Amino acid sequence: MSFKNEIKCQRCGRWNHWENRIFDVCYFCGEFLDIQSIYKEARETERAIHYENTSFLVIRKHDKWYIRIIKKIFAVVNLIFIALVGFMVFLVSIAPG
C-alpha cells in the first residue's frame, strides 16, 4: 500500500508529488517544497555551534593543561553543590509539618 503525498508549492501555487524529503523541489518552478524544515535544520545547527563555542565547562582538545584542570575542578565543585542543594531539598520535603 503506497500513500501519495502532495504539497502545494509556496512560490507558484501548484500541487506537487512529495516524498517527505527535505530537499524535494517543485516540478514547475524548482523551489524547495519544505522550506520551513530547511530553515529549522539550519537554526538547530547554528544553535549547536553557538552552544559549543560559548559553553564554559566543555573541555576541548586545544585547551591548555592548566585550563583543563581548572575546568575539571569547577565541574566537581559544581556537582558537589548540586548534590548538597538536592539533599537539602529532600530533607525539607520529608520534614513533618
Image: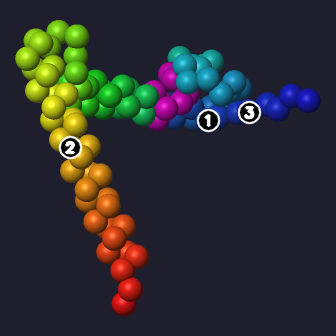
Q: Is residue 17 left or right of residue 62?
A: right
* Residue 37 percent location from the top left of the image: 49, 32
Residue indicated by mark 3: 5
* Labels 2, 3: front one: 2
Residue indicated by mark 1: 8
Query: Mark 2: which amino acid?
Result: Asn
Residue 26 seen in the current view? no
Q: Is residue 1 left or right of residue 92?
A: right
Residue located at (55% from left, 24% from top): 22
* Residues under numbered marks 2 and 1 in contact, where contact means CB atoms less than 8 Å apart: no
Q: Magenta stretch: give its range.
A: 31-38
- Eyeballing the image, is 37 above or below 78? above
Residue 9 seen in the current view? yes
- Residue 2 appears in which quarter of the rendering? top right
From the image, which quarter does the C terminus lie in? bottom left
Dot 3 falls on a residue whose secondary structure is: strand
Residue indicated by mark 2: 78
* Residue 33 percent location from the top left of the image: 55, 28
Query: Mark 1: which amino acid?
Result: Lys
* Residue 58 percent location from the top left of the image: 23, 26
Question: Does residue 34 belong to the magenta stretch?
Answer: yes
User: In the rendered structure, which disc, 2 or 1, sits on the residue that comes first in sequence?
Assistant: 1
Query: How far apart are the alpha carbons under marks 3 and 1?
Result: 10 Å
